[in-house]
Image (cartoon, rainbow, N blue to C red):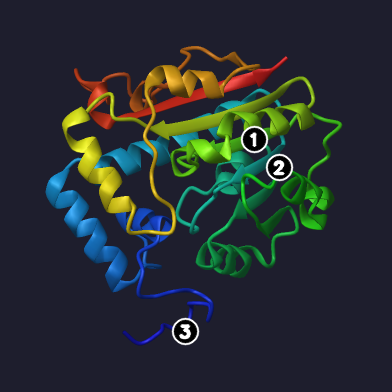
Amino acid sequence: MQRPSWAPDEVDIDRPSAARVYDYYLGGLHNFAVDRAMAARAVADWPELPRIMQANRAFLRRAVRHLAEQGIDQFLDIGSGIPTVGNVHEVAQTVRPDARVVYVDIDPVAVAHSRALLADDPRTGVVQGDFTEVAAVLDDPITRSLIDFSRPVGVLVVALLHFVDDERRPAEVLARYREAMPPGSFLVISHASADGAPERAGDHQALYRRTATPMRMRTRDEVAALLDGFTLVDPGLVFLPEWRPDDPVAAGDHPERFTGYAAVGRRD
């Protein structure tokens, strides 16, 4: 296919990207035919996937709003993805107009679009970085210019950890971020799990092995272990639509069908 003008030269347009597939699920425009083909195959096997992705995004918005209401005015969004409606800075700044946000992603398309979108906003910054390279993320000049680590910060790792396999020791990585977070800070996570649909998990993980970011779904106990050292905010570790829903009936009778866990933890 012809390379669109918005795609950086270093982007492989012939291999699907998890970030661009997610963008497609959310109704975004920054994806390629290969991403849409992968999404179509996934949805054919698992029709609820777009709703699951939208539920994840809705959880992100609710969590950011909650943190802003608790006084958090600086956010580090790691694995932020391709910009779409309801970004972290938009939600946070409706509560705290002076809120500052640093977006971090490894995907060059996500980074390029974030920089283009936010070029004129002095309260936001964009870093191209790998979640597991903690020092590089925290010490980046853009991060340091916007985030004051002597004050509480909201660290977001939403729909990211299932792309970090066990060999990269995600719990240890999160512990290093926790050490850098002052008391009163918060960690926001969501994580894909096979618990709600075990019969579909194998094929879905196999599909993501075609991308540069294979998926590692985890059980509830495995996700809980990643939150070690944080005090969970009510209602604790729950399925995506169950975390402080705007509409209490939105999850329906079977929230497990959303096959993803969500939690917010406080650093005491």
Within the image, what quadrant is residue 96 found in? Answer: top right
Question: Please, what is the three-letter code of the amino acid marked with disc 3?
Answer: Ser
- Judge left or right: residue 211 versus residue 140: left
Please give the residue where the numbered disc 3 appears in the rendered image.
Answer: 5
Q: Are marks 2 and 3 in contact (CB under 8 Å)?
A: no
Question: Please, what is the three-letter code of the amino acid marked with disc 2?
Answer: Ala
Within the image, what quadrant is residue 113 found in? Answer: bottom right
When the figure is inspected, residue 148 is found, relative to residue 251, above or below; the finding is below
- Which structural element holds mark 1? helix
Please give the residue where the numbered disc 1 appears in the rendered image.
Answer: 173
Q: Residue at x 39, y 24 (%)?
A: 245
Labels 1 and 2: the sequence-earlier one: 2
Labels 1 and 3: the sequence-earlier one: 3
In the rendered image, residue 82, in percent from the top left (x then y), is placed at 48, 59
In three-dimensional space, the C-alpha distance between marks 2 and 3, rounded to whole angstroms, equals 32 Å
Please give the residue where the numbered disc 2 appears in the rendered image.
Answer: 99
In three-dimensional space, the C-alpha distance between marks 1 and 2, rounded to whole angstroms, equals 26 Å
Q: Callout 1 environment at 10 Å: few (<14), some (14 to 19), or many (20+)?
A: some
Within the image, what quadrant is residue 117 found in? Answer: bottom right
Whether residue 67 is visible? yes
Question: Please, what is the three-letter code of the amino acid marked with disc 1?
Answer: Val
- Looking at the figure, which quarter contains the N terminus? bottom left
- Which structural element holds mark 3? loop
Q: Callout 2 environment at 10 Å: few (<14), some (14 to 19), or many (20+)?
A: many
